[in-house]
Image (tube, grey):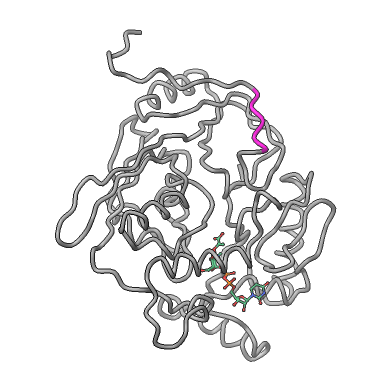
Amino acid sequence: MNRAQNAPPPAKLIPNLGLKDRNTFGFDAKAELAYEITAPEQIPELISEIARQKLAWRVLGGGSNVILPDNLPGATLLMNISGQEIISSNSEATFLAVGGGVNWHDLVSWTLENDLPGLENLALIPGTVGAAPIQNIGAYGVEVADYIDSIEAFDVKDQAFVTLTNEACCFAYRDSYFKQNPQRFIVTKVVFKLPKAWQARIHYADLAKQFSEGSTPSPEDIFLAVCKIRTRKLPDPKLIGNAGSFFQNPIVPNEKFETLLKAHPNLVSYPDAQGKRKLAAGWLIDQCGFKGQRMGSVGVYENQALVLVNHGDGTSKDILGLAKCIQDKVRAEFGVSLQIEPNIL
Ligand code: EPU
């Protein structure tokens, strides 16, 4: 095939690639055919080839929100598209275009160094920029959806690049149009809209505690405070394998919440949409006595019951076995179903 003069080379193929260092659980998974995607233009040809050969396929970003099986058959697309640039600016906001393979925390640091505040509450979340909108990452009262202008992606169904506006992404708590349509979109670029009018958001209890009453923290102060809390509460994947919160915080109707509260006056919850209440899954799991427990090579983190960990040579089967025990016990104790947050590949 004739390649256009400036077209990038095809995606590099790496057969039988070990993914231990490319998933934060540290599972010893193997990708049969790993393709390194460094430019959007490589995608259409690769997807056609995958379809022609009827291969299974999936995209892997930073591997911070996935549960990998021992073997990944077919094609694994390693999202490595880099680059970040300010594309426009007006009196209200700065627009920033960022490649899907850029490390999320590096981007947050870069925005602050360049005097573009807004993302500081989302510091230290592991993973890539391209994965951030899929589960609409969120922390300390902020969700990435609050700052997304639009998303560029390859639509595998229609075989075309598309731009989705923020509205079209149907963002909700840990949810999006991308998550609702698995295997359809490959996010290549995210355009962020960072408003020039900045306001500190420190209402989230854990964060508020870091500042004295009436103080006016800067974006950098908030960034450092968030890093401090996360480092204390969440295990460093380089030291103990984990994927952050393993379950979503369940959302229940108010009546169910009232019944639970009568039986458990210490129940931790947050207001949600009208008529609903979000429960702290970490509290429910903690009450069932799982915190710090081990089951073979996997376990529940000692400082945060919502985080499941791999102590060494655990596998996806081990972690899913532990997850089932937790789900069964929480259902039996509280009548609440816990949904697994990371993607099970
Ligand atoms: N709690 C316990 N025991 C525990 C853990 C929590 O009793 O072992 C109670 C505490 O009362 C605590 C409350 O549950 O105050 C909530 O816990 P925390 O503030 O740690 O937040 P979370 O609900 O566990 C959510 C996100 C995190 C995010 C934090 C901060 C989800 C599923 N998780 O956790 O996101 O960093 O809020 O905003 O929504 C992630 O998604 O991977 C993640 C880390």
Q: Quadrant of residue 120?
A: bottom left
Furthest residue in direction top, as rendered: 1
Quick check: which quadrant has ligand 1?
A: bottom right
Q: Is residue 337 above or below residue 80?
A: below
Q: Quadrant of the C terminus?
A: top right
Q: Quadrant of the N terminus?
A: top left
| Residue at far left of view | 91
- Picture coordinates of residue 269 (x, y %)? 55, 80
Whole-percent x and y of residue 204? 47, 77
Picture coordinates of residue 295, whole percent (x, y): 83, 57
Left or right of 44? Residue 207 is right
Residue at 36 percent of width and 38 percent of height:
83
Q: Residue at x 52, y 22 (%)?
A: 54
Residue 88, relative to residue 172: is it above or below?
Answer: above
Q: Is residue 9 left or right of residue 326?
A: left
Percent across and percent down for residue 170 are 35, 56
The residue at the point 65 percent across, 51 percent down is 237
Q: Is residue 88 above or below residue 74?
A: below
Q: In the displayed structure, would residue 6 be above or below residue 126?
A: above
- The picture quadrant where one finds residue 255 is bottom right
Q: Is residue 18 magenta?
A: yes
Q: Which residues are the magenta region?
A: 16-20
Q: Specify whether residue 260 is painted magenta.
A: no
Q: Is residue 286 left or right of residue 104?
A: right
Q: Residue at x 62, y 43 (%)?
A: 23
Residue closest to the eye, 20 or 91: 91
Magenta span: predominant SS is strand
